[in-house]
């Protein structure tokens, strides 16, 4: 455990020292992964779905606020969807506008959550986002979580209809609009996922603020179990076809990711908990103090090694009584 704490301190000190360089690099990598995944998932506009364009956009996003990445990712997705179908672009555009209104109203500082959640869906560990968001965020962060879930399912649906577009005989525009709206709005899997992820985020936030030992760890366990419970109950009630084994494995992996984040962000030594009582003229206070786990830097002792000439000089001085 001491070795892990030493590694944590080294990482934190390294980040604090080179933050001005690390943050742009991380933003660049996040933007590049986002744009490449959109191009691979959709990619209907072939002239735009090229690596140099994604690279240039990622470089631009590395020097701009993260909210620009959210807007750029939505714009790129809309261009690809428009190349597939104007009707789909209109419907998805309306959904995106609603999401942006909710996002900028309640959680404009949680842009990382909205971007990372679709990526975690692609890697089959979406549970990591609500658990981490509940640990580090606020109740408003659940809005970003819900927006990320809806955005992922919208893009996933559009990518799905592109495969059957050649077989579908929809000649009237009204028929196309109706089919796309029903496919997005009545998506039972999306609705269950939104409820599960938002509930898990809020549960983690509420539990980790309780006055109990190991509150953060208990909060992650409660959030993970609640997320799985809602997904499975929704599957039984609405037949959302949730993969049981995949959901359990993804939840375990997501919990592991959240635990790593918790290790770097919040580590307490409950063995040294102190309870203090004091009063003033109006109130009597009961305070519970739990110290953070820190490593004291050992003092370095420098031993001076004397040269041969210095040792001879010291010997002469001792003989002469100096």
Image (tube, rainbow, N blue to C red):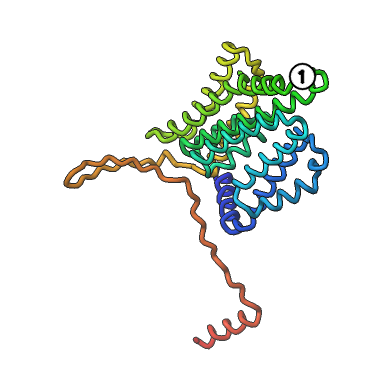
Residue nearest the viewer, comparing 81 with 270: 81
Q: Position of residue 287 (x, y in %)?
A: 30, 41
Whether 47 is drawn above or below 315: the answer is above
Give the residue drawn at x 44%, y 45%.
292
Circle 1 Cα neighbour tier, 10 Å, few/some/many (<14 / 14–19 / ≥20): few
Q: Position of residue 155 (x, y in %)?
A: 69, 30
Give the residue drawn at x 57%, y 38%.
100
Q: Which residue is mark 1?
A: 170
Residue nearest the viewer, comparing 144 with 180: 180
Q: Horizontal placement of 271 versus 155: left or right?
A: left
Q: Position of residue 312 (x, y in %)?
A: 62, 82
Q: Horizontal placement of 216 versus 285: left or right?
A: right
Q: Position of residue 51 (x, y in %)?
A: 80, 45
Residue 72 seen in the figure: yes
Give the residue drawn at x 71%, y 52%.
59
Tag 1 secondary structure: loop
Whether 310 is drawn above or below 122: the answer is below
Q: Quadrant of the N terminus?
A: top right
Give the residue drawn at x 64%, y 45%.
69
Q: Horizontal placement of 156 versus 212: left or right?
A: right
Residue 248 seen in the figure: no
Residue nearest the viewer, comparing 12 with 86: 86
Residue nearest the viewer, comparing 230 with 185: 185
Q: Quadrant of residue 252?
A: top right
| The residue positioned farthest toward the left in the image shown | 281
């Amino acid at each position: 455990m001491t070795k892990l704490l030493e590694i944590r301190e080294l990482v934190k000190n390294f980040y604090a020292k080179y933050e001005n360089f690390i943050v742009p690099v991380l933003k660049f990598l996040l933007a590049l992964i986002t744009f490449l995944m959109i191009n691979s998932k959709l990619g209907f506009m072939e002239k735009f779905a090229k690596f140099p364009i994604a690279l240039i956009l990622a470089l631009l996003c590395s020097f701009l606020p993260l909210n620009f990445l959210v807007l750029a990712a939505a714009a790129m997705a809309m261009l690809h969807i428009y190349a597939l179908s104007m009707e789909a672009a209109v419907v998805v555009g309306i959904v995106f506008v609603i999401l942006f209104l909710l996002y900028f109203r309640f959680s404009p500082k949680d842009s990382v959550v909205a971007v990372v959640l679709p990526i975690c869906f692609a890697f089959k560990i979406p549970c990591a986002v609500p658990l981490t968001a509940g640990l580090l965020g606020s109740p408003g962060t659940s809005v970003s979580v819900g927006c990320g879930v809806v955005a992922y399912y919208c893009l996933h649906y559009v990518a799905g209809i592109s495969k059957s577009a050649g077989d579908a005989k929809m000649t009237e525009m009204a028929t196309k609009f109706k089919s796309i709206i029903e496919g997005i709005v009545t998506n039972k899997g999306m609705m269950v996922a939104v409820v599960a992820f938002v509930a898990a985020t809020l549960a983690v936030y509420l539990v980790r603020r309780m006055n109990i030992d190991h509150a953060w760890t208990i909060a992650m366990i409660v959030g993970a179990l609640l997320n799985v419970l809602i997904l499975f109950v929704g599957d039984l009630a609405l037949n959302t076809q949730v993969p049981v084994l995949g959901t359990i494995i993804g939840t375990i992996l997501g919990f592991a990711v959240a635990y790593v984040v918790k290790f770097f962000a919040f580590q307490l030594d409950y063995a040294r908990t102190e309870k203090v009582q004091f009063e003033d003229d109006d109130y009597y206070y009961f305070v519970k103090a739990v110290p953070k786990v820190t490593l004291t830097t050992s003092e370095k002792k420098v031993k001076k090694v004397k040269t041969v000439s210095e040792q001879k000089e010291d010997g002469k001085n001792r003989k002469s009584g100096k």
